[in-house]
Amino acid sequence: MRMNIDYWNKSIETGDREVLEKTQLADLRKTVDQALKTDFYGKRLRTEGIESGEDIRSIADLHRIPYTTKQDLRDAYPYGLLAIPLSEVVRLHVSSGTTGIPTVIYHSQADLNSWTDLGARSVIATGAGKDDVFQNMMTYGLFTGGLGLHYGGERAGMLVIPASSGNTQRQIKLMHDFKTTVVHATPSYMLHLAARMQNDGVDPASLSLRKAFVGAEPHSENVRLKIEELFGIDVYNSYGLSEMNGPAVAFECVYKKGMHVWEDAYIMEVVDPETGEPVEDGQSGELVFTTLKREATPLLRYRTRDLSFVYDTECECGRKHRRIGRIKGRTDDMLIINGVNIYPSQIEEAIMRLPEIGNNYQIIVEKSGALDKLTVKTEVRKSIFSDDAREINALRKRAIENLKSSIIVTPIVEFHEPGILPVQEGKAKRVFDMRKEEQA
Ligand code: AMP
Ligand code: ZN
C-alpha cells in the first residue's frame, strides 16, 4: 500500500547504511572520550585498555567495552556518570524503579536539543504534523514520558496541550474543547479512557481524534487493535527508557510494522540475556543500547532487560533505521509458575483475543500448598452478568482454553464488571506475585 510519507531529517532517515555506520563510529569515539571523563567509565574503560575514543577502530570494537547495567547506574548515583561540569547541566530525570534505589540521567542543552529533534522525527514519522493538536497525557515530572515528547511535539509544529496524566473528565473536556487530534498515553490509560467515555455517554466519533502514540508499558497487538477500534483511530507504538532519554528511542512509522530505532542516536545490539552473546536478526533477545549524542551522561552498552527482536527486512517507508518488534516483556518480569516460564504479555495476548473481554485485567500468582496458583481477573461487559449463566460459563471456558494453549498452565479466570479493577495514573500494575510479597 502506498502511503503519504513525510520525513523530519530525510537524509539521516533514508541515507545509506554505510554513511550511517560511519557517523555512528565517529560519534561512538566522541562518546567514549566523553565517558572517560566520568568516575565510573574512567576506571572501567582504562581497566580494559581503552584510554581514548581513538582506541575504538570500528563498530566491532564495541565488544571491547563491558556492558553497563542498571546496578552500575545505582552504584554511580548521584554523580558517578556525569561527564560535564554541573554548571553545563540544564535538566535531570530521576527514576526510582521498583527497588527504590534511584538512578539519574543529566542533560546539557545540546542533549535536550538532540532529544527534541528525535521527538519531532518520531511524531512526523507517524504522519502527524503542524496541523495537529497534541494532547500529551503522559505524566510530566521526573518520569520522562511527559516532557520527553512535549518539546518534540512543539518542534514538529503541533499545538501541544501539556495535560499530563489523570483527571479523565478534564482530559475528555480538553479533547472536546480544543479538538485534539493526537494523544500520547499508556495503552492501559487509553483503555480506561474508552471505558470512561462509554460510561459517560461520550461517543468517540464526536471527538476529532485521529492518532494515539502509546508506550511506557508492554502491550499486545490485540490491545493496539482494541484501542484502534474503540476510538476509530490509528495507534502507534512508542518505545523509550529514561536511561536512553525517554520516549523517541524507537517509534512506529505510518506502516505500523515495528518501531524504527533511531540509529544515528543509539547503537543497538540484541543479545542473549543469559550469555550476553549477540543473537541473529529475527531472534528474540535483550536490547542493548549505546548513546551516540549525549554529552552529560554517556552510556555504553546499556542492558535494558527489554526483550524484542529486529526485523530482517527493510520498511516500505524508506527509512534505513532498523525496526524492533513489540516488546515481549522484561527479563526480570518473567514468572515461573509450577516450573513453566511465562511472560505477562502472553497472558494479555491470550485474553485480549476474546472481543467480549474488557479493558482491564490483573494477574495474581499465589502459593497453594506446594503448588503455584495463577488467577487472571478481567473485566467483561456489564450485561453479561444478567444474561443466561451459560453464556458467562462458556466465555470463561474459552478464556481458560486460550490461556492454556498459550501458557500451558491452567489458570482460574475471574470476571468483574467494568470499573472494578484499579487503574494507575502512570504505568499499569498488572502482576501481583504474592509469592514474592510473602517472602519479603
Ligand atoms: P522508564 O525508564 O521508567 O521510562 O521505563 C522504561 C521501560 O518501560 C522500558 O525499559 C520498557 O520496559 C518499558 N517500555 C517503554 N516503552 C514501551 C513500549 N512501547 N512497549 C513495551 N514496554 C515499554
Ligand atoms: Zn517505516
Image: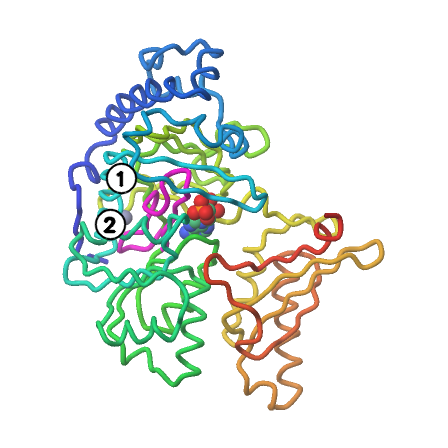
Q: Is mark 1 within 8 Å of ligand 1?
A: no
Image location of residue 376, percent across then percent down:
64, 66
59 is within the stretch colored magenta: no
Image location of residue 78, percent across then percent down:
46, 32
- In the depicted structure, whether residue 241 falls above or below residue 273: below
Three-letter amino acid code at the position of disc 1: Leu
Q: Quadrant of residue 399?
A: bottom right
Q: Which residues are magenta?
A: 237-257
Q: Residue at x 29, y 22 (%)?
A: 25
Left or right of 131 in this view: 182: right
Q: Nearer the viewer, residue 260 or 40?
A: 40
Image location of residue 406, percent across then percent down:
61, 58
238 is within the stretch colored magenta: yes
Q: Quadrant of residue 201?
A: bottom left
Residue 112 is marked as: 1
Disc 2, SS: helix
Q: CA distance from mark 2 to mark 1?
A: 9 Å
* Number of residues whose C-alpha sits closer than 10 Å to that of mark 2, classed few (under 14), some (14–19) or many (20 or more): many
Q: Residue at x 43, y 52 (%)?
A: 216
Residue found farthest to the front: 87
Left or right of 283 in this view: 160: left
Q: Which residue is mark 2?
A: 151
Q: Residue at x 39, y 72 (%)?
A: 168
* Residue 326, visible in the rendered structure: no
- In the depicted structure, whether residue 213 falls above or below residue 35: below
Q: Nearer the viewer, residue 84 or 411?
A: 84
* Number of residues whose C-alpha sits closer than 10 Å to that of mark 1, classed few (under 14), some (14–19) or many (20 or more): many
Contact, mark 2 vs mark 1 (Cβ under 8 Å): yes
Image location of residue 308, percent across then percent down:
47, 44
Disc 1, SS: helix
